[in-house]
Image (cartoon, helix red, strand yellow):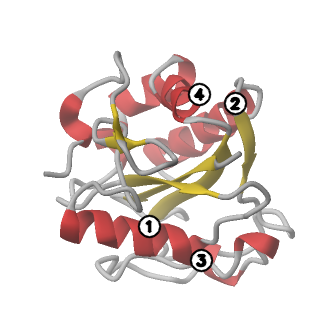
């Protein structure tokens, strides 16, 4: 049975190393959100560094999730002092489970505050696609799909919650999936 892969990417207003209150608040909320989402029905797994959070996204060992990658349009730093991004890569049993996790609870509260932390880049900030059972998507897969979504709009290989596709490639619609601001085109 196919699983849903979900890649998110955002450019932060300040670097991860910024000691300011907004950055600390983002870190604190992220930890709580990850704990809550990992208990959500339909959640299977997410990319986690094998060596914890020691270093930047770029120099961590992500195991089967592959080498960390970013979209070509990311122009900020790649060092501990300059990295200004947040990215996630996760697997879900189905589309409805992922939508429910994103648009409810702590994650919904964080979405309501996203512009406190993230720049408005004009680029899509997430993408979904289906993978075969047993396949672990890589960071590069997520980047490629996000860039495809930006360049071509929603398609079976790269789609949003609002313009989604079933595993067989047919368009599908879910009701109650949150704000329409996730539409790329």
Q: Tag 1's secondary structure?
A: loop
In this view, the residue in front, 175 or 165, is: 165
Task: Please give the residue where the numbered disc 4 appears in the rendered image.
Answer: 97
- The reply to whether residue 18 is visible in this rendering is no
Rendered location of residue 97, percent (x, y): 59, 28
| Residue at image location 32% in from the left, 72% down from the top | 147
Using the numbered discs, state the Cα–Cα distance from disc 1 to disc 2 in whole angstroms: 30 Å
Q: Is residue 57 above or below residue 179?
A: below
* Residue position marked by numbered label 3 in the rendering: 80
Marks 4,1: beta carbons within 8 A: no
Image quadrant assignment for residue 61 = bottom right
Dot 4, crowdedness within 10 Å: few (<14), some or many (≥20)? some
Residue at image mark 1: 84
Q: Residues within 10 Å of mark 1 (few under 14, many from 20)?
A: many
Quarter of the view holding residue 37: top right
Q: Which mark is residue 42?
A: 2
Location of residue 116 in the rendering, given as x and y in whole percent from the top left corner: 32, 40
């Amino acid at each position: 049975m196919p699983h849903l892969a979900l890649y998110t990417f955002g450019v932060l207003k300040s670097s991860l190393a910024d000691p300011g209150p907004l950055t600390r608040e983002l870190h604190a909320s992220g930890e709580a959100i990850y704990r809550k989402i990992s208990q959500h029905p339909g959640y299977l797994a997410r990319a986690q560094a094998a060596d914890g959070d020691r270093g930047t996204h770029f120099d961590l060992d992500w195991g089967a999730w592959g080498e960390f990658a970013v979209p070509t349009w990311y122009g900020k730093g790649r060092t501990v002092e300059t990295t200004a991004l947040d990215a996630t890569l996760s697997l879900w049993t189905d589309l409805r489970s992922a939508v429910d996790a994103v648009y409810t609870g702590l994650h919904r509260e964080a979405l309501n505050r996203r512009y406190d932390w993230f720049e408005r880049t004009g680029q899509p900030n997430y993408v979904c696609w289906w993978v075969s059972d047993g396949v672990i998507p890589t960071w590069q897969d997520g980047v490629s799909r996000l860039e495809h979504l930006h360049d071509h709009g929603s398609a079976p290989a790269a789609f949003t919650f609002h313009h989604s596709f079933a595993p067989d490639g047919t368009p599908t619609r879910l009701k109650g999936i949150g704000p329409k601001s996730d539409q790329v085109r």
